Amino acid sequence: MLLNFYLFFIVLTSTALLISWIKHSHNFIKRSIILLVLLHVVCLALWGGIYTFSLLISMILLSGVYELAKQYSPSPFLGILYTAVFLGVLFLFIPYFIYLIPLFLLVSIYSFRGSSRQIFHYSFFILFSFFILGISAVSLIELYRLNSNHLILLLLLIQLNDAFALVGGSLYGKWHIFPKISPKKTLEGYLSGGVMMIVGIVILHTFIPVIKGNDLWQDGILFLYLFFFANAGDLLFSSIKRKLDIKDFSSFLPGHGGILDRFGNIFFAAPGWYILIDRGIIW
């Protein structure tokens, strides 16, 4: 499965890079190159086993916390230390972390509804780092522990949604449906991303047969869940950036922004996806 996933995205990303080079689109060239690098890093971590993958997710988590902590007055490294300790506690009580997911939802709602003054408060940073980023990171690791194919599915569908929502919005976007939160997001972009997620589900039944035995209703739940939560996660992080008055969380990944800009929607979709898998609703 992993080899097929790797080959699929090598072809897709290389094609995007070639088209970007022909059209002299420097931003898309940078995005494509970074995606190629990330593809190799993620595939190596998936291939390396649970400890390698856990290390990668922990590094992504702490890098994201550092990006967010820079917007607040205390030292960013204190935020990393607090989150690392919380992550360690979660690992000690892994069977019970699922009971913290209601807090994940509450902090998510607060993040959307909170004012700029509330979002700028250091307590929000702690809540968000612990109950959004921390719980999401553990969910991704536990998904791998259950079966790495769950992550292949998650990464493939969300990446297809992201990539083609961007392309569709750039080429055809006219209806800006969230102008205050994310002015560049358009109805046409969302529709393009949704169509490609459906194509991705077909691919997951055929070339990368992760869900070969799934029924149509399971595919429907899969599509609706990931389409909603991937896009909601993107909007959540865009909303926080607006309230913090920043364009990107950092410039660490050229063409994408920072770690949270690139991985935020994957993190946001992970806890609910873990529940669906753990309770046998999808598989």
Image (tube, grey):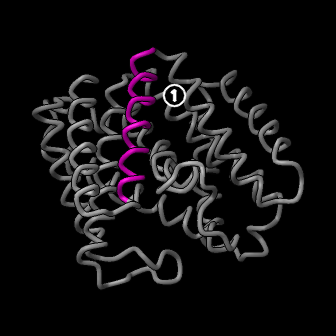
- Considering depth in this image, is 199 or 108 the residue closer to the camera? 199
Left or right: 204 in relation to 26: left
Check if residue 171 falls in the magenta segment. Answer: no
Residue 193 drawn above or below residue 92? below
Residue linked to disc 1: 141
Residue at 40% from the left image edge and 52% from the top image edge: 31
Q: Where is residue 30 in the image (x, y as percent from the top left)?
A: 42, 52
Q: Where is residue 254 in the image (x, y as percent from the top left)?
A: 51, 53
Question: Which corner quadrant of the image does residue 21 belong to?
Answer: bottom left
- Which residues, given as a range, are shown in magenta? 28-48
Residue at 23% from the left image edge and 77% from the top image edge: 172
In which quadrant of the rendered image does the C terminus lie?
Answer: top left
Residue 143 drawn above or below residue 228? above
Check if residue 47 falls in the magenta segment. Answer: yes
Residue at 72% from the left image edge and 26% from the top image edge: 88
Residue at 62% from the left image edge and 74% from the top image edge: 242
Left or right: 235 in relation to 93: left
Q: What secondary structure is the stretch in magenta mostly built from?
A: helix
Extreme residue in the left direction: 206
Extreme residue in the right direction: 74
Question: Which corner quadrant of the image does residue 162 belong to?
Answer: bottom left
Q: Where is residue 226 in the image (x, y as percent from the top left)?
A: 34, 51
Mark 1 element type? helix
Pointer 1 local density, CA inside 10 Å: few below 14, some 14–19, many at least 20: many
Q: Where is residue 87 in the image (x, y as percent from the top left)?
A: 70, 32
Query: Which residue type does callout 1 highlight?
Result: Ile
Left or right: 132 in relation to 162: right
Left or right: 217 in relation to 221: left
In which quadrant of the rendered image does the N terminus lie?
Answer: top left
